[in-house]
Amino acid sequence: VLSAFTHVKTQACGNFLRNKEVFHQMKSRNFDVGIFEPVSVCGLGFMHALGIDKVIMASSCALHEVASAAIGEPIDIAYVPGMMSKTVDQMSLFERLENYKMAKSIQKMQHEIWDQETALYRTHLGSDVPDWRDLMPASSVFFTNSIPYVDFPRTVTQKTVPIGGISVDMAAIRGQKLSIEWSTVLDERPYNIFGPFPQMDSHGRKLTFIERNLLDIYFLIGIPYLIGFLSLFCVYRFVLGRSFNKLVKKE
C-alpha cells in the first residue's frame, strides 16, 4: 500500500512539473509568499524556482511528526501519540514500542517520497534548487491544525503556530480599511495577504520580552548604583567638605 502511494505521489509531481506553461504563468505574477502543506515537497521546490523566498508551512494535521522533525522540533514519541497512532498519551511499554515503530515507518516513507520529488524538481527546474532538508527549515512559520487546550501537549518552537478551530469572517475583513501607508502598497495588486509577524531574537523571543528584561536589569543595577553615587556625593559634599574647609581656615 505504501509503495503504491509513493508511486502515485511521484507521478503526480512529475506531471505537474512537466507543465512549463503553468510555471511561466506563475512566475509572471511575482508572488511574495508561498504556502504549502508538507505532504509533498514538489511545490516547495517549485516555489523556490519561482523566486519565492518567504514560505509558510501549513498542515491539516494536529501533529505531523515528520515535518516537525524536519524543522528541528523534538519529537517526543515516548509519550506523545503519533499521527497514525491509535493510543492515548498513557501508553504501555508495548504501545510505546508500537508508536515508535509506526512513527519511524511513516518517516521512512515520507523521506523516500520527498527524496524522489527532490530529484524530480531538480530535473525539471534545475540542479541548483536546494534539497528539501534545506528548504523546509528555512520556512518562516508552520501553521498546524491543533488546539493546544485539547490536543496532547508536546514540545514546540516559536515557529509552530496552532490555528485549530480558528474561523475567518471574510465579511468583517472586507469591511475593514487599512491605513494609507499599507493600502498604497497592497492596492497595487488585485490579491494580497497582509500578515504582520513580530520581530524575534535568535532564541525566538519577542523584542518586548527583551526590553522588559533590560528594564528590570536597569532597576536592579542602575537604581542601586544611582543611590550609592548620591550617597557618596552627599558624604563628600556635606561631611568631608565641611571638615576640609575647617582645616583650610585653621591653616
Image (cartoon, rainbow, N blue to C red):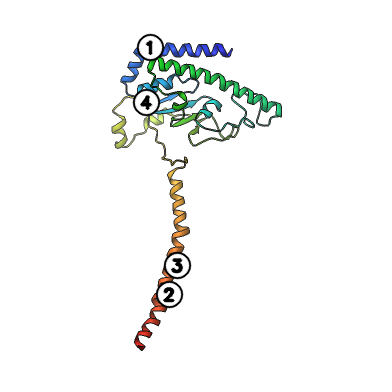
Identify the disc placed on residue 235.
2
Report the quarter where the C terminus lies: bottom left
Q: Position of residue 41 (x, y in %)?
A: 46, 21
Q: Position of residue 23 (x, y in %)?
A: 35, 16
Which residue in the structure is indicated by mark 3?
Answer: 228
| Label whose residue precedes the other's in the sequence (2 or 4) | 4
Q: Residues within 10 Å of mark 3 (few under 14, many from 20)?
A: few
Q: Quadrant of residue 128?
A: top left
Give the CA separation, mark 3 to mark 4.
56 Å
Mark 1 vs mark 4, CA separation in Å: 19 Å
- Which amino acid type is marked by label 1? Asn
Tag 1 and tag 2, C-beta contact below 8 Å: no
Q: Residue at position x 31%, y 30% from top?
A: 186
Q: CA distance from mark 1 to mark 2?
A: 85 Å
Query: Few, some or many C-alpha atoms within 10 Å of disc 2 (few <14, some 14-19, many ≥20)?
Result: few
Left or right, 156 with respect to 91, comes to left
Q: Residue at x 48, y 34 (%)?
A: 159
Q: Residue at x 43, y 44 (%)?
A: 207
Q: Mark 3 is on which residue type?
A: Gly
Instruction: Please say whether residue 219 is visible from this viewpoint.
Output: yes
State the residue position of label 4. 52
Helix, strand or loop for disc 4: loop
- Residue 145 visible in the picture: no
- Mark 3 or mark 4: name the one nearer the start of the chain: 4
Q: In this orientation, which residue lies closer to the viewer: 176 or 125? A: 125
- Cα–Cα span, label 2 and label 4: 66 Å
Disc 4 residue type (three-letter): Ile
